[in-house]
Amino acid sequence: MMQRQWWREGIVYQVYPRSFMDGNGDGIGDLPGLISRLDHLQWLGVTIVWINPVYRSPNHDNGYDVSDYLAIAPEFGTLDDWRALRDGLHARGMRLVMDLVVNHSSNEHPWFCESRKRDSAKRDWYLWRPPAGAGGPPNSWRAVFGGSAWHFDEASGEYYLGLFSRWQPDLNWRSPALREAVFAMMRQWLDLGVDGFRMDVINMIAKDPAWLDGDPEPGASPPGEAFMNRTDAHEWLVQMRREVFAGREVMTVGECPGAQPDDAVLFTSPERSELDMIFQFEHVGLDQMGSKWQTKPLDLLALKRSLGRWQTALDGRGWNSLYLMNHDQPRSVSRFGDDGIWREESAKLLLTLNLSLQGTPFLYQGEEIGMKNCPFASIDDYRDIESLAHAEEARASGESDAEILAALHRMSRDNSRTPMQWSAEPNAGFTTGTPWIALNPDWHGINVEAAREDPNSILHYLRRLIAVRQAHPGLIHGRYAPVDEENPRVFAYLREHETGSFLVALNFGEREAGFALPAGLAGALSPLIGNYPAPADPASLRPWEAAIWKLG
Ligand code: TEU
Ligand code: CA
């Protein structure tokens, strides 16, 4: 079905509206601000824009607690502003993907307010359970942002499930009426001209009834399959495709923490008509030991094996999304690259990785200029519910503020939520007011205006890289084949396609490193793009050198 291919050939730019551009001086990014920067996105060459939630919300989790799915939050603007954004993107040949947060709503959503009444017809639109026999929560599940995942409601004398927080009650997708209410809302957005949805933790919408009524094995930690990637979730996504998307040109990407390649084949194989692609989390878990706050150095071999596994698993059977960061992850150049003296080279290398694999690349605001993690001086500078919950728990367990800050500097989601850096003007040109969150103080040297003036900047490199990828179908669709797999410092691979094949080589480090060329390729390499002025030498790649060659 050719009509569904546009999202395979596309390149997505993720905008976190709250931190992208403030149009009215209140310190909060908004839709008019985003509209004023669309030429930047068009100049870059991206073709799809995904915006994080802009619906009405109490903002306990910055919009991932929705209290009205059909209203634009006042801090972002009006529905007319949204229409102007849609028209501005479409006029520039770009498409608009909205965030769909329907594993849970806000506890202030009217649906939940009604559901709190025990005799309400919407009681079963959420997951209510009586206290366990001895009192207390029905099972041992912990909430992602701290404490129990079960929250007691005095009015009805029962607990409700909120896997993330008390402000984010989980919707009960087993209710056909709830599913239809969600589908009706989605159809309204599609009728307004939305081109696709990014679906928040969509693989969590089905929970194991046995666990909802108590711990089958008391004291055992709940297995992921109790609430992730369950068969019912697949069935409800097939129903969604049939009842919402039929006959429409819509892109769908499901955020699926904990999904394995086999799950991804089920979610994304075209024959199953569920989703077009998913966000998997394996590569962004490699530098962690258990919790995200206990980190270890990244092992390049582990990264090569992980990304290679996903390339092979979905080749011809599904489709990958490709990302190195987003609004939940730290800045890619700080995490996977070197944000010190090799910042520019390593940022270009990471962009080359993300745009030379099979799948749809997702870029996050600021990646185009190599924005770095932001080491706030005080825990009070942080805004994110997840970071503040961690700080509270860590303090309670005796960690010092210095230890807590060190973990936040590495992994806080606020690293990627500091305001976009547009120029060397006050507040980096993001706002004329007081920003809702502090800027990274390095904006004087790292900003879009400065990058536009430097032909060797990350920004200009990315623009060339996007043009190269879009001009060569083999870089989009080609089969991935590892090269010199056990090389501990160089990530090299082929992309084989009938329209033309390519060799990619990435030296992950500041030491010169070579790699073993596949037999017969030595004389067949035509340099296509690289992050150094002179062409790369496969026998001796320079520090953080990235190169793509055309074969033949
Ligand atoms: O994130 C889901 C999710 O798994 C995150 O909790 C992520 O694993 C974690 O933040 C990594 O530190 C989605 C949204 O992207 C996130 O912003 C929301 O907070 C969350 O769902 C709840 O809606
Ligand atoms: Ca604003």
Image: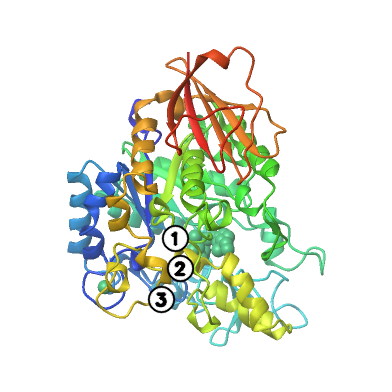
Q: Which residue is mark 2?
A: 105
How far is the residue under mark 1 from the one under mark 3?
23 Å
Q: Can you say whether 389 is above or below 291 in the image?
A: below
Q: Which residue is mark 3?
A: 437
The first of marks 1 and 3 along the sequence is: 1
Q: Which residue is mark 1?
A: 101
| Along the viewing direction, whichever of 389 and 333 lies nearer the viewer | 333
| Along the viewing direction, whichever of 453 and 331 lies nearer the viewer | 453
How far is the residue under mark 2 from the one under mark 1?
7 Å
Left or right placement of residue 149 versus residue 413 in this view: right
Amino acid type at circle 1 is Val
Residue 529 locus on image (x, y percent): 42, 31
Residue 279 locus on image (x, y percent): 52, 48
Q: Residue at x 51, y 39 (%)?
A: 353
Left or right placement of residue 315 versus residue 147 in this view: left
Q: Say few, some or many: other residues with alpha carbon within 10 Å of mark 3 (under 14 / 14 to 19 / 20 or more).
A: some
Amino acid type at circle 2 is Ser
Mark 1 vs ligand 1: CB under 8 Å?
yes
Residue 481 locus on image (x, y percent): 60, 25
Residue 179 locus on image (x, y percent): 45, 55
| Along the viewing direction, whichever of 483 and 445 lies nearer the viewer | 445
| Along the viewing direction, whichever of 483 and 315 lies nearer the viewer | 483
Q: Nearer the viewer, mark 3 or mark 2?
A: 3
Q: Is residue 93 visible?
A: yes
Circle 1 SS class: loop
Left or right placement of residue 229 versus residue 7 in this view: right
Q: Residue at x 70, y 85 (%)?
A: 396
How far is the residue under mark 3 from the one under mark 2?
25 Å
Circle 2 SS class: loop
